[in-house]
C-alpha cells in the first residue's frame, strides 16, 4: 500500500506541493490530474525518492520513502515525463543492463526480459537498436525497463505525451493491464480523456494542493448533488419552461441549442414522475436524459486554473 | 571499495557505447583508426630519426594526453543529464561507488591504454641516449597521472555543470591557462626565474621533501607542477649516471632533482588532486542522486 502523509515541497517562498494525503492499494490505477505547473511532477519525483520533501513523508508497504530511499527504490518503477535511453545497444541489451543494475540473478534475466518484452509488445524489436525505435516504442521500452525488477508501485509521469493516437491507445491498454496485475499505478496527465478510461481513482491537484481525491464515481456523485436533465421538446419551448419552473424539484432551466437543461434536485423516482407528468400534460418530448459528469466536467468544476 | 563481480555501467561505458557504432560505421571508424595509426608512426619516426631525448618523447605523449584525456571524461555525467537518463540510473540498486567506478573506471582504462601507446616511444630513447629507468618510469607516471587528473576533473565538471559543451570548453580553456598562461605570466614578471637552481644545494631526500613543503607557499609552484616542465627536467635526469664529464654544478643540479623525487612527487600530487575530484563527485552522487 502507498500511504502519502502530508507530503510538502517548498522552494524558498514557493510552495510547490502542499501537504498531500492519500492512500492507494494494490490494483489501484490513480490518475493524478492537474494543469501544467500544478505540482504533479514534483510529487512524483518525491515519491520516486529523487527529491527530498520539505515536510511529510510516504510509506510504501510500510517503508518510509524519506528515511529509507535505497530500500524503497527496488519496489518502484518510474517513467519520467522526459526520458532518454542508453543508445548504441539493442533493446535486449538495454533491458539486460537494467536487470543487472537491479541485481536480478543472471540465470533469471533471460526469462524476465522475455516476459517484459511480451507484455510491452516489443518482442519483435528485441534485436533493434534503441535509437532506431519510434517514440511510442521508446516509451514502451522505458516502461519495460521500469518493470524488469517487478515493482509494486509504478510512477508514470505523462506517459502518453507526444504519442500518436495508436500509441496512446496501446499505452492505455498496457497501464490497464498493469493495474489488473495488482500493481499500484500512479499516472499523471493533464489530458483528461486519457485517464478517464482506465483510472479507478483520481486526484486533482492545483497550485500544489490536492483539491479532491478518491474513486471516480464517488467524486462525480459528490459533485452532482443536482442532476442535470436534458429535455428536448418538439414545438415551442416557452410553455414547457414555465411548466418546469412550477415543479418543486426543479431549481433552474436553461435553454441551449434547442434543448432545455434542467437542474433537478430529486431522485430517480421524481425524475420518472416528472417525465410521466409532462407526457400526461401533452408535451411532446423527443429527448429526456440525465447529463452525467465526465472527468473534464469534474476537473473544470473543481479547479480554478491556477498554478503554484 | 566493496568488490562487485558485475558492474553493468562499466561494461556500457567501456564497450556498449561504441561497440555497435564500429560495426555500423566501419568506414568512418576505419578511417579514424588509420589516421591515428599513421600519426603515431610519424611521431615514432620523428623521435627515432632525430635522436630525441626522453623529455621530448614524453612531451609528445603529454600533448596527446592533454588533447584526448578530456574527451574520455567530458560527457560522463553531463550526457546522463542531457539525455535525461540519470533518474533511471539513480533509481537502480547500483551504489554511488559503483556508478562512480563504472564511469571513472572506464575513463581510466582508456587513459591507461593511451599511456601504454607512448611506452614504445619512450623506450626507443634508451638506446639512443641511455635513458635511466628512474626517469622513464617517472615519465610514464607523469603521463598517466596528469591524464587521470584531467579525466577526474572532467568527470566532476560534467557532474557539476551538467552540460557537455561547458565541460569540454572549461577543460581545454583550463589547460591553456594552467599550462601556458599562468606559468608565462609568472615567468614574465619573475624575470624567468624558475627557482630550480636552489635545488643544487639539496643533499638528501629529507631536504628534498622540505623543499617541496616550502614551495607550496611559492608562486613558482605553478611552474614546478607543469607537466611539460616536469618532463623536460626528466630528460635531464635521463642522462647516463654518474654524469661523468659534467661540471660539478650540473651534477649537483641533477642530484637535486633526484633528491626531489622529481616526476614521482608531481605524479603523486596529480593523483591526489584526482582523488579529491573523485571524492567530490562521489559526495555529489550521494547528495544529489540520494544514493
Image (tube, coloured by chain):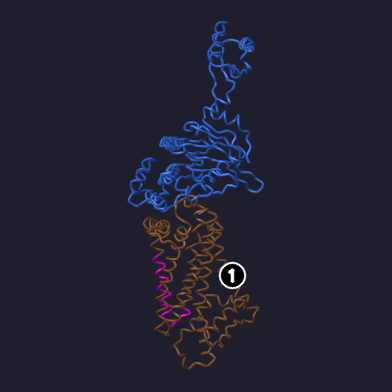
Percent x, y for residue A302?
60, 31
Q: Quadrant of the C terminus of chain A?
A: top right
Judge whether residue B48 is colored magenta.
yes
Task: Indicate left or right for A88 with B184 as reference.
Answer: left
Q: In the rendered structure, which segment of residues is drawn in magenta?
A: B33-56
Give the farthest residue toward the front. Answer: A62
- What secondary structure characterizes most of the magenta part? helix
**Residue nearer the viewer, B148 or A43:** A43
Q: Which residue is mark 1?
A: B177
Assess disc 1: are there few (<14), some (14-19) or many (≥20) residues with their C-alpha within 10 Å of its C-alpha: some
**Residue nearer the viewer, B9 or A4:** A4
Position above or below: A71 against B171: above
Percent x, y for residue B57?
45, 78
**Residue nearer the viewer, A285 or B265:** B265
Judge whether residue A56 is colored magenta.
no
Which residue does the image show at 42% across and 65% down from the upper left?
B109
Q: Colour of chain A?
A: blue
Percent x, y for residue B116?
41, 72
Find numbered disc 1 in the image and state the secondary structure of the residue it sits on.
helix
* Quarter of the image where one finds residue A231: top right
Position above or below: B196 against A213: below
Percent x, y for residue B289?
52, 53
- Which chain identifier belongs to the brown chain? B
**Residue nearer the viewer, B130 or A192:** A192
Position above or below: A296 against A308: above
Amino acid at each position: 500500500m502507498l500511504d502519502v502523509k502530508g507530503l510538502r515541497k517548498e522552494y524558498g517562498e514557493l510552495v510547490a506541493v502542499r501537504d498531500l494525503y492519500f492512500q492507494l492499494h494494490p490494483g489501484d490505477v490513480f490518475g493524478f490530474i492537474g494543469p501544467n505547473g500544478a505540482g504533479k511532477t514534483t510529487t512524483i519525483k518525491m515519491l520516486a525518492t529523487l527529491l527530498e520533501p520539505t515536510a511529510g513523508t510516504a510509506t510504501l508497504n510500510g517503508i518510509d520513502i524519506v528515511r529509507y530511499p535505497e530500500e524503497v527504490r527496488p519496489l518502484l518503477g518510474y517513467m519520467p515525463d522526459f526520458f532518454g535511453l542508453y543508445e548504441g545497444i539493442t533493446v535486449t541489451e538495454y533491458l539486460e543492463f537494467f536487470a543487472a543494475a537491479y541485481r536480478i540473478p543472471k540465470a533469471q534475466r533471460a526469462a524476465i526480459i522475455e516476459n517484459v518484452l511480451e507484455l510491452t509488445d516489443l518482442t519483435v524489436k528485441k534485436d533493434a537498436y534503441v535509437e532506431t525505435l519510434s517514440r511510442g516504442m521508446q516509451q514502451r521500452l522505458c516502461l519495460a525497463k521500469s518493470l524488469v525488477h517487478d515493482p509494486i508501485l509504478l510512477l508514470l509521469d505523462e506517459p502518453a505525451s507526444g504519442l500518436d493516437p495508436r500509441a496512446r491507445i496501446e499505452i492505455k491498454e498496457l497501464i490497464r493491464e498493469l493495474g489488473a496485475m495488482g500493481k499500484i499505478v500512479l499516472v499523471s496527465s493533464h489530458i483528461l480523456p486519457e485517464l478517464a478510461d482506465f483510472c479507478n481513482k483520481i486526484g486533482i491537484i492545483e497550485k500544489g494542493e490536492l483539491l479532491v481525491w478518491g474513486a471516480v464515481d464517488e467524486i462525480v456523485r459528490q459533485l452532482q448533488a443536482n442532476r442535470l436533465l436534458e429535455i428536448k421538446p418538439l414545438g415551442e419551448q416557452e410553455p414547457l419552461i414555465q411548466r418546469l419552473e412550477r415543479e418543486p424539484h426543479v431549481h433552474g432551466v436553461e435553454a441551449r441549442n434547442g434543448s432545455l437543461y434542467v437542474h433537478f434536485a430529486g431522485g430517480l423516482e421524481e425524475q420518472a414522475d416528472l417525465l410521466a407528468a409532462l407526457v400526461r400534460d401533452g408535451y411532446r418530448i423527443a429527448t429526456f436524459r440525465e447529463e452525467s459528469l465526465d472527468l473534464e466536467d469534474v476537473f473544470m468544476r473543481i479547479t480554478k486554473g491556477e498554478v503554484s | 571499495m566493496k568488490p562487485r563481480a558485475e558492474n553493468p555501467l562499466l561494461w556500457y561505458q567501456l564497450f556498449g557505447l561504441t561497440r555497435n557504432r564500429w560495426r555500423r560505421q566501419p568506414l568512418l571508424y576505419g578511417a579514424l583508426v588509420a589516421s591515428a595509426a599513421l600519426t603515431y608512426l610519424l611521431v615514432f619516426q620523428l623521435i627515432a630519426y632525430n635522436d630525441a631525448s626522453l623529455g621530448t618523447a614524453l612531451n609528445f605523449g603529454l600533448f596527446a594526453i592533454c588533447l584526448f584525456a578530456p574527451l574520455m571524461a567530458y560527457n560522463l555525467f553531463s550526457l546522463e543529464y542531457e539525455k535525461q537518463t540519470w533518474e533511471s540510473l539513480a533509481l537502480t540498486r547500483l551504489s554511488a561507488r559503483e556508478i562512480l567506478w563504472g564511469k571513472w573506471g572506464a575513463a581510466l582504462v582508456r587513459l591507461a591504454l593511451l599511456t601504454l601507446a607512448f611506452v614504445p616511444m619512450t623506450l626507443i630513447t634508451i638506446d639512443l641516449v641511455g635513458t635511466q629507468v628512474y626517469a622513464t618510469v617517472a615519465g610514464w607516471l607523469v603521463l598517466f597521472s596528469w591524464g587521470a587528473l584531467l579525466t577526474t576533473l572532467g568527470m566532476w565538471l560534467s557532474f557539476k555543470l551538467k552540460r557537455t559543451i561547458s565541460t569540454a570548453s572549461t577543460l581545454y580553456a583550463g589547460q591553456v591557462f594552467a599550462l601556458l598562461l599562468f606559468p608565462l605570466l609568472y615567468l614574465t614578471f619573475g624575470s624567468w626565474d624558475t627557482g630550480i637552481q636552489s635545488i643544487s644545494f639539496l643533499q638528501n631526500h629529507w631536504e628534498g621533501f622540505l623543499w617541496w613543503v616550502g614551495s607550496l607557499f611559492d608562486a613558482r609552484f605553478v611552474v614546478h607542477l607543469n607537466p611539460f616542465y616536469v618532463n623536460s627536467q626528466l630528460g635531464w635526469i635521463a642522462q647516463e649516471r654518474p654524469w661523468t664529464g659534467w661540471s660539478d654544478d650540473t651534477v649537483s643540479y641533477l642530484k637535486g632533482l633526484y633528491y626531489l623525487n622529481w616526476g614521482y612527487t608531481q605524479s603523486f600530487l596529480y593523483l591526489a588532486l584526482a582523488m579529491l575530484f573523485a571524492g567530490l563527485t562521489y559526495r555529489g552522487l550521494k547528495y544529489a542522486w540520494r544514493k
